[in-house]
Image: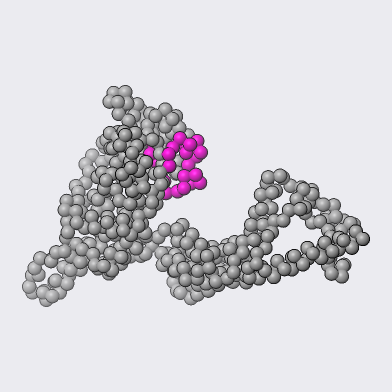
Amino acid sequence: MARRAGGTSPAPLFAPPDRLRPLADRMRPRSLDEVVGQDALLGPGAALRRLVEGGRLPSCILWGPPGSGKTTIGRLLAEAIGARFAALNSTTDGVATLRGVVEDARSAAALEGRTTVVFLDEVHRYSKAQQDSLLPHVESGTIVLVGATTEPPIAGGITPPLLSRLRVFRLQPLGEAELATIAARALADPTLGLAGAFALDESAARQLIGYASGDARRMLGLLETAALLAERRTIDAALADAAGDIAPGPVARPVIVESADIARAAQSPMLGYDRSGVISALIKSIRGSDPDAALWWLATALESGEDPRYLARRLVISASEDVGNAEPAGLPLAVAALTAVEKIGAETNDEGLYALAQAAVFLAASPKSAAAGRGFFAARDELRAHGPRPVPGHLRPAARTYRNPHDEADGAIDQAYLPRGVAARRFWEPTDAGAEARLRELHEARLEAKVKASRRRGE
């Protein structure tokens, strides 16, 4: 095995020829100017571009969705400042491998005067101890660390000590226009791309970009497979036309890639399923009272292979978190949908999906209130901030000073139920939405009756 240029990880002795490399690998940008969709970071005058043009690259995190170009950009940044490049993966390269990279970096700095950029993919998967092992080398400048992550750095597993030593650069998901540009470049490139031998019809282009879900790598892999299927389809059609006794002529170029070729290449829409994004969109559509959007994201999740039971559990959560007491029927309906999916099933038939659709539409169309949940968390925050308080004596078991509201004609008793120190707090702030408006009216009437009862006792 040979060592990677500028690094210590083993690599094959012979790289495959270009024709055997996947299209996505062949079409990686060869300069920062070829990077598509990240102008906010790399465009003229952008902060990161200005830094590398000045010959400097800070240790940093490249945070962005899959297929947005993190690995390619890391390599191009190292090239832009004339640095050595060592690529590591957090799932396969541990502290021992890192130690070897650091030793090579020290030697290169001493003998060649060159900086070493260590690209660590999936940096959030490194354990706390592994991340701590990076700290002295980043802080001393022995290496320039470029970490790549798909998770939010603050809450996504990167430790505060390491994060404090890194700049965070956010990569944007690739939009339809950017993906169309990348696809057109791959179709036309005469040496590393498809050299004009294939073309997409309009519907196939839309379908290809839709399946990509913002991931250029996924899109190019799908395009390459669909092109091969289209060519095979064209050849088979030519053979059929020749009736088997006349050799068909050469396949006309370009071969048109159709929607059916894209669908066959994808096999399943799950290819481009952004689970966290779709589930977030579903819940936010319900919260935003848009039944049509809720049905769209529900269908997207299910068609992508999502577990219907997981979706039903999310609807149960939304019924309490978002709908709450504004429409109390939402929670039992969501629980019933969960039960229906579990009892009927939905993986091999569509019957169980009616219950999910019914619950999603009902929750989205219902009035909304988060008052109950917010009240609970406000009470919990108070408890955590100041600690528990003793139970008032009149609320303890068999307390003689306790007054039972059922013994009063109107049930109005001026009796404290909160402990000292928080007796004046109001954690639940009911809204005027739906059924909760009636609860608010009843609650305010009880408060007024208690005040009147207190005044009578005072008189």
Residue 173 sits above or below residue 358 on the image: above
Q: Quadrant of the C terminus?
A: bottom right
Q: Quadrant of the N terminus?
A: top left
**Residue visible at 17% across and 59% down?**
196
Visual colour scheme: one colour
Lateral position of residue 318 relative to residue 247, left or right: right
Q: Nearer the viewer, residue 416 or 401?
A: 416
Residue 435 sits above or below residue 155 on the image: below
**Residue visible at 64% across and 61% down?**
371
Q: Tell me, yes or no, if residue 217 can be seen here.
A: yes
Which image quadrant is residue 222 in?
bottom left
> Quick one: which residue is furthest to the left in this view?
246
The residue segment tinted magenta is 145-168
Lateral position of residue 352 relative to residue 192, left or right: right
Magenta stretch contains residue 147: yes
Lateral position of residue 422 relative to residue 397, left or right: left
Q: Position of residue 420 (x, y in %)?
A: 79, 49
Q: Nearer the viewer, residue 138 or 422?
A: 422
Q: Nearer the viewer, residue 453 or 241?
A: 453
Q: Position of residue 391 (x, y in %)?
A: 80, 51
> Quick one: which residue is furthest to the top in this view?
110
> Quick one: which residue is furthest to the right in this view?
459
Q: Position of residue 413 (x, y in %)?
A: 84, 62
Magenta stretch contains residue 285: no
Q: Nearer the viewer, residue 192 or 416?
A: 416
Q: Position of residue 129 (x, y in %)?
A: 49, 36
Lateral position of residue 116 relative to residue 256, left or right: right
Q: Tell me, yes or no, if residue 232 can be seen here.
A: no
Which image quadrant is residue 404 in?
bottom right
**Residue visible at 33% across and 59% down?**
176
